[in-house]
Image (cartoon, grey):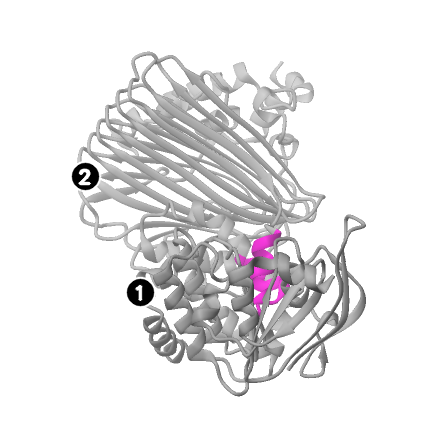
Amino acid sequence: MADAAAKTDPTEAMIASLSKPEATWAAPAREDALARLRTMGLPQRRDEYWKYTRPDTLTQTVAPEAKLLAAEEVPMFDGAERLQIVFVDGVYDEEASDDLSLEGVTIERLAAADSDLHWAKNLYGVLEARGQTPVARPLAALNTAFATDGVLIHVTGKPSKPINMIYHRKSEGSDAILHHCIKLDAGAEVTVLENGAAAARFNKVMEVEVADGASFHHIRTQGRDHERRAATHIFARLGTNSAFRSFTMTVNGVLTRNDCVIELTGDDAIANVAGACVGDGDFHHDDTVFITHDAVNCQSRQVFKKVLRNGATGVFQGKILVKEGAQKTDGYQISQSLLLDGDSQFLAKPELEIYADDVACSHGSTSGAIDEDALFYLRSRGVPHAEATDMLTLSFLAEAVEEIDDEGLREEMTERLGAWLQRRRD
Amino acid sequence: MLSIKNLQVKLEDEDKQILKGVDLEVEAGKVHAIMGPNGSGKSTLSYVLSGKDGYEVTDGSAELEGEDLLDMEPEERAAAGLFLAFQYPVEIPGVGNMTFLRTAVNAQRKARGEEEMSAAEFLKVVRARAKELKIDADMLKRPVNMGFSGGEKKRNEILQMAMLEPKMCILDETDSGLDVDAMKLVAEGVNALRSEGRGFLVITHYQRLLDHIKPDVVHIMANGRIVKTGGPELALEVENNGYADILAEVV
């Protein structure tokens, strides 16, 4: 019966193609996720939130191959004091990783956490399940059901250095599913860095519980292998007076879909989500953000900037939902694209849904070309056309990069974006 | 230095002739002023010389030290030694003023086959020049012209001029939007750059700027042509009697 269904139904075919992880404390959560996935089915083009991004290559059973990028460059965050956790094609690499002990935090591998009373039992698949309504996110349910690796990070204090997940890719056909759970106790603070191309096809979920007064910083770059594909989800829940800040830089990648689902459940919390991306050719980049305000006096910001050329496509679907009683909400959303030629396109769907009467929410979305007056101004000072265009491109991205609190990381991002532009010029 | 002969220019998009045969010679070491009523073509002349898009040269020539300006890209004109101080300097968010200045200085040096300025050397020079123009450290760090007052923007133009050390400087309505104190400061900055090897073309509506930047030659422009040329006294004539008398006399 199951085999017959697998032949005709893509969801069943996908389920049949994946091997069930070993039964541990996470088994019930995985069973629930599998049931959710079966009910929802894998994403299809006709789904409301997949209109602009074709899900086919993310839902076919075999990952399309992706050539490895032969580039010699200094890896991201190199030289920064950090705790490194390395994955190769989605598998934890103990040898390349640092010792996981660090004051103020406990870090375990998902695959190795075998206690039946594990804290992650209350988080693994929990925020993902909450994030399935009102919009279904089947790839995240698939992840919860089948992820075999990832890390469980319990932040009890203020660790002295950031935790850096590094995703190497060494295979042209790797299909990786990783699931991380991060729990911040009241008043705790942590910075999580992520970088690397990860896999030919990468499905990643990160669930983040930010308790009262805690602060979570997240900076990631998604490797610039041109043919790689990624579907990532962040699910976060914020307590009173807590803060969540996430910035993503994406350069290249034939397909990237980043979902970010945040619930502000405690008063006076802050959520900032930002992204800067640059791509050309068949580059397709989709940011889908859903922020729910369910408490008083919370702030949220969404700042997304995309630079597109040679036929590249950028997508932004951003929603602010203000529930009844979430008074004094301050919601801000901006998504902008810089189209460097007439072939590229930006598809934006900003949404506001407000059920409280004392709120301030604003949103804006624009597409534009390089400002000719500014370009002439720079050229009249002797800056050549191509270099002047790059300066104005960086200037366009600056508003998103400014969302990074840490000055050093902010400068590194600007340098990387500049280097990408420079490479395109050479 | 700057040699303009029978320059005729029309707007690219419309069949509208703006300059109808401008002849002008600016010698090294001299300050020439162009005065004229609104719509006479003064700003168009400055844009055409610096290479802005949207204009079509239908006849005539413009040379800088014998080099054909009209054949060059804007950045090539800059590297050749031409500088335009904008009437409305452009705001550029996200690009630090200092970064912008250094990129410009080094791009020009590179184009001329000269050695680029080191970060340390640049910093030393820019600080000294900025101090003379009463530009504080904060203005140097801020994004280009962002949140600058009218006076600060114009001082920033003069700072760029001082750093780029051009041969031929064109100032387009540099006095517009300035109060007397700000104008004095800008004029002092310009005067400090006057030298034997450098020519100036000062475009202005009013005589008052010329009280502070003393011109050697004054031209009156009207209807796309230079209609009268004289000494500094011509500017005073305009101040006292307006353009009407002069134009009536010419026609």
The answer, for residue A61, to whether it is visible in the render is yes
Residue ID for mark 1: B137
Indicate the amino acid at tag 2: Thr
Q: Is disc 1 in the same subunit as disc 2?
A: no
Q: CA distance from mark 1 to mark 2?
A: 42 Å
Q: What chain does badge 2 belong to?
A: A
- Tell me the amino acid under the disc marked 1: Ala
Q: Quadrant of residue A116?
A: top left
Displayed quadrant of residue A31: top left
Look at 78% across and 48% down and name the residue there.
B14
Residue bearing the label numbered 2: A156
A210 or A91, nearer to the observer: A210
Q: Is A353 rendered above or below residue B113?
A: above
Position of the C terminus of chain A, as image quadrant, is bottom right
Region in magenta: A372-391
10 Å crowding of disc 1: few (<14), some (14-19), many (20+) = few
Image depth: mark 1 or mark 2 in front: 1
In this view of the protein, which residue sits in the foreground, A374 or B248?
Answer: B248
